[in-house]
Image (cartoon, rainbow, N blue to C red):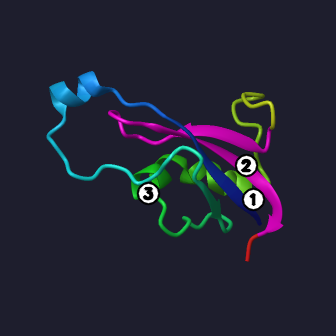
């Protein structure tokens, strides 16, 4: 089993949808573009968003176990995936990449 690198690539904010539908909240997301996390096999990295993990954990598990090539050639690097969290107001897109390093 391998480690999987998770990099926050982009965050989009839909202010119009937030204003119309979201109840005001004090704290939404700590992840910033450029943040890097490493999953030890398919274990959620410490401090990683639970909701984002739910969106990507199946992809991380496949990559950690040597799989890839999702959707028959979707990604240029078949040992990677671009996955967004499920926050409909401020989704973050993450690049998942299999590392050569073995999980502990």
Q: Is residue 6 above or below residue 88?
A: below
What crowding class fits label 2: few (fewer than 14 Cα within 10 Å), some (14-19), or many (20 or more)? many
Q: Is residue 66 above or below residue 24?
A: below
Q: Which residue is mark 3?
A: 49
**Magenta span covers which residues?**
78-102
Determine if the magenta segment contains residue 1. no
Q: Nearer the viewer, mark 2 or mark 1?
A: 2
Question: What residue is drawn where x is 73% and y is 43%?
Answer: 80
SS class of the residue under badge 2? strand
Question: What residue is drawn where x is 69% and y is 55%?
Answer: 5
Q: Which residue is mark 2?
A: 97
Determine if the magenta segment contains residue 93. yes
Q: Nearer the viewer, mark 1 or mark 3?
A: 3
Image label count: 3
Work out whether mark 2 precedes mark 1 in sequence or the reverse, and give the earlier one.
Answer: 1
Work out whether mark 1 precedes mark 3 in sequence or the reverse, and give the earlier one.
Answer: 3
Question: What residue is drawn where x is 49% and y is 54%?
Answer: 53
Say whether residue 83 is left or right of residue 29. Answer: right
Percent of width and height locating residue 27: 27, 53
Percent of width and height locating residue 48: 48, 61
Q: Nearer the viewer, residue 33 or 81?
A: 33
If the image is split into quadrants, where does the N terminus sit?
bottom right
What crowding class fits label 1: few (fewer than 14 Cα within 10 Å), some (14-19), or many (20 or more)? some
Say whether residue 50 is left or right of residue 24. Answer: right
- Does the magenta stretch mainly form a helix, a strand or a loop? strand
Q: Which residue is mark 1?
A: 65
The disc at residue 87 is none
| Circle 2/circle 1 CB separation < 8 Å | no
If the image is split into quadrants, where does the C terminus sit?
bottom right
Q: Nearer the viewer, residue 65 or 100?
A: 100
Q: CA distance from mark 2 to mark 3?
A: 18 Å
């Amino acid at each position: 089993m391998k480690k999987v690198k998770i990099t926050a690539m982009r965050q989009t904010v839909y202010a119009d949808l937030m204003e119309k539908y979201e109840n005001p909240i004090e704290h939404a997301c700590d992840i910033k573009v450029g943040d890097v996390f490493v999953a030890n096999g398919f274990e959620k990295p410490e401090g990683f968003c639970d909701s984002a993990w739910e969106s990507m954990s199946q992809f991380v598990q496949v990559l950690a176990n040597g799989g890839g090539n999702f959707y028959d050639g979707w990604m240029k690097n078949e040992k990677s995936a671009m996955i967004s969290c499920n926050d409909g107001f401020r989704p973050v897109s993450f690049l998942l990449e299999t590392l050569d390093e073995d999980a502990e």
